[in-house]
Image (tube, rainbow, N blue to C red):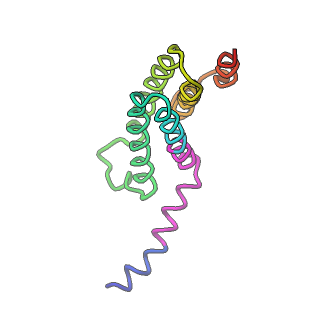
């Protein structure tokens, strides 16, 4: 019994790592990294806004593990694409609101960087469900340098 489990472990590992090479896996991993960067920026300037980044990073990691371990096929009563879509839509809206609030408040450079990174996170979330026209980062960086 233990030998059969040991033989299936490399196949399981290969199945888990193969998801991280797909477009969805790369986007979810990039979302986790971007949430970590936003968390660091907010922690350095205004810790009150960091809870959104923490919650979104945890939810993205949960969805990453669910898709990586192919649990979405084993739990069919939840519509996983719609769940992921609504998660990213709500996160994009909340990130946009938070970044506007942070950028309206004048503050130090880390606060501006956190606001700009949050504005960049919103198109990352929208890329999965909605499209945004143009680039946000160059405009915000030009405005913050004035």
Q: Position of residue 66 (x, y in %)?
A: 40, 52
Q: Position of residue 105 (x, y in %)?
A: 50, 15
**Looking at the image, which residue is at 54% across and 15% down?**
106
Q: Is residue 23 magenta?
A: yes
**Looking at the image, which residue is at 51% across and 31% down?**
129
- The image quadrant where one finds the N terminus is bottom left
**Which residue is at the far front?**
108
Q: Is residue 80 magenta?
A: no
Of 122 and 78, nearer the camera is: 122
**Looking at the image, which residue is at 34% across and 84% down?**
2
Horizontal side of 77 relative to 124 (left or right) equals left
Q: Position of residue 109 (x, y in %)?
A: 59, 26
Of 15 and 118, nearer the camera is: 118
- The image quadrant where one finds the C terminus is top right
Q: Which residues are magenta?
A: 11-32
Give the quadrant of residue 82.
top left
Q: State the predominant SS element of the stretch in magenta.
A: helix
Q: Position of residue 107 (x, y in %)?
A: 53, 20
**Looking at the image, which residue is at 44% across and 43% down?**
60
Count of number-bearing discs: 0
Horizontal side of 50 relative to 31 (left or right) equals left
Give the quadrant of residue 56.
top left
């Amino acid at each position: 019994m233990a030998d059969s489990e040991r033989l299936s472990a490399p196949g399981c590992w290969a199945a888990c790592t193969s998801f991280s090479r797909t477009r969805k896996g790369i986007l979810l991993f990039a979302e986790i990294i971007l949430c970590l960067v936003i968390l660091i920026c907010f922690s350095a300037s205004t810790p009150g806004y960091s809870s959104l980044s923490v919650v979104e990073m945890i939810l993205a990691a949960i969805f990453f593990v669910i898709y990586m371990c192919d649990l979405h096929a084993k739990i069919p009563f939840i519509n996983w694409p719609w769940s992921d879509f609504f998660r990213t839509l709500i996160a994009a809206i909340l990130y946009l609101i938070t970044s506007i609030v942070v950028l309206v408040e004048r503050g130090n450079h880390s606060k501006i960087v956190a606001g700009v990174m949050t504005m960049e996170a919103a198109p990352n979330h929208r890329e999965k469900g909605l499209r945004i026209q143009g680039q946000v980062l160059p405009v915000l960086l030009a405005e913050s340098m004035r």
